[in-house]
């Protein structure tokens, strides 16, 4: 199904496919040369990647530049903000030592659940609704396909794929994305243990 839809989007009349990465870390999810997304990224002028990551040390700008050189016409943007259910600011506590010992990330793991660690950093917070309104407004102007059409391969979704990985706050991200979600063809989001214990609360899966 994905291959068929990706090939359809390469047609000259197809609108650009938007890819959303919330909690981008290093930017590897879409930009790590995964064959799964190659058809969309390689289509000239047919992909717009938006990656939200608040950590100031993220190498995503370099990853975007490299991807733009590799895929002609690709638009790739870093959104330097956290994403939640309301705009504002928040504090992240960065565990750099853990990241170095595990060699998983040069930006450090964000201990957002426990608020433990060295002095925190204040970051801006936006919602997915606002992010898309500002960076890809055509998405919200489109008429989303009916729910019964999802997966049939015959309808165009303005957002081809959305990935949300925010260490337990994924539910809040989705609460702030009610205008965007009807336009999303495929959604991948993390079911964190924190959410499983949260029941029907706003941060837990039960409330989504």
Image: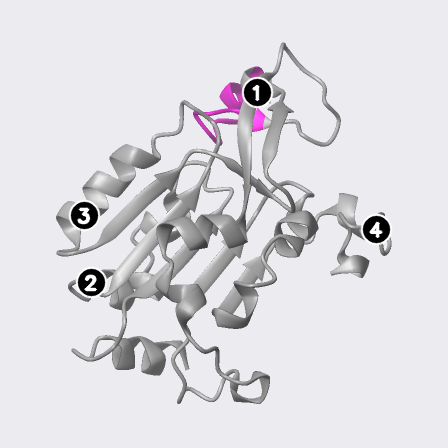
**In the image, residue 24 above or below residue 2:** above
The mark that comes first in sequence, 1 or 2, is 2
The percent position of residue 90, horizontal first and vertical second, equals: 63, 27
Q: Secondary structure at mark 1?
A: strand
Residue 37 shows in this picture: yes
Q: CA distance from mark 4 to mark 3?
A: 40 Å
Q: Secondary structure at mark 3?
A: helix
Residue closer to the observer: 94 or 45: 45
**In the image, residue 67 above or below residue 5:** above
The percent position of residue 183, horizontal first and vertical second, equals: 48, 70
> Mark 4, residues whose alpha carbon is within 10 Å: few (<14), some, or many (≥20)?
some
Q: Is residue 98 magenta?
A: yes
Q: Which residues are magenta?
A: 97-109
Q: Which residue is mark 2?
A: 42
Residue at image location 56% in from the left, 15% down from the top: 97
Q: Secondary structure at mark 4?
A: loop
Q: Quadrant of residue 56?
A: top left
Query: Which residue is most to the front?
Result: 141
Q: Which residue is mark 4?
A: 201
Q: Which residue is mark 1?
A: 122
Q: Which residue is mark 3?
A: 68
The mark that comes first in sequence, 4 or 1, is 1
- Locate residue 153 relative to residue 15 in the image: left or right: right
The mark that comes first in sequence, 4 or 3, is 3
The mark that comes first in sequence, 3 or 2, is 2
> Mark 1, residues whose alpha carbon is within 10 Å: few (<14), some, or many (≥20)?
few
- Locate residue 35 relative to residue 205 in the image: left or right: left
Quadrant the N terminus occupies:
bottom left
Q: CA distance from mark 3 to mark 1?
A: 30 Å
């Amino acid at each position: 199904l994905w291959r068929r839809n990706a090939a359809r989007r390469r047609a000259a009349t197809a609108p650009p496919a938007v890819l959303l990465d919330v909690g981008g870390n290093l930017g590897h999810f879409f930009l790590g040369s995964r064959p799964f997304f190659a058809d969309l990224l390689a289509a000239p002028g047919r992909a717009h990647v938006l990656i939200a990551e608040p950590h100031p040390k993220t190498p995503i700008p370099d990853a975007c530049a490299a991807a733009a050189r590799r895929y002609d016409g690709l638009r790739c943007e870093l959104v330097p903000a956290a994403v939640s259910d309301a705009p504002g600011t928040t504090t992240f506590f960065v565990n750099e030592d853990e990241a170095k010992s595990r060699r998983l990330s040069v930006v450090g793991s964000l201990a957002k659940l426990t608020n433990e660690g060295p002095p925190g950093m204040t970051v801006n917070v936006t919602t997915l609704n606002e992010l898309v309104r500002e960076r890809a407004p055509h998405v919200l102007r489109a008429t989303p396909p009916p729910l019964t059409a999802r997966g049939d391969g015959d309808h165009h979704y303005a957002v081809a794929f959305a990935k949300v990985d925010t260490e337990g706050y994924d539910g809040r991200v989705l609460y702030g994305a009610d205008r965007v979600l009807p336009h999303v063809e495929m959604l991948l989001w993390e079911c964190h243990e924190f959410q499983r214990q949260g029941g029907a609360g706003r941060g837990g899966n039960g409330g989504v």
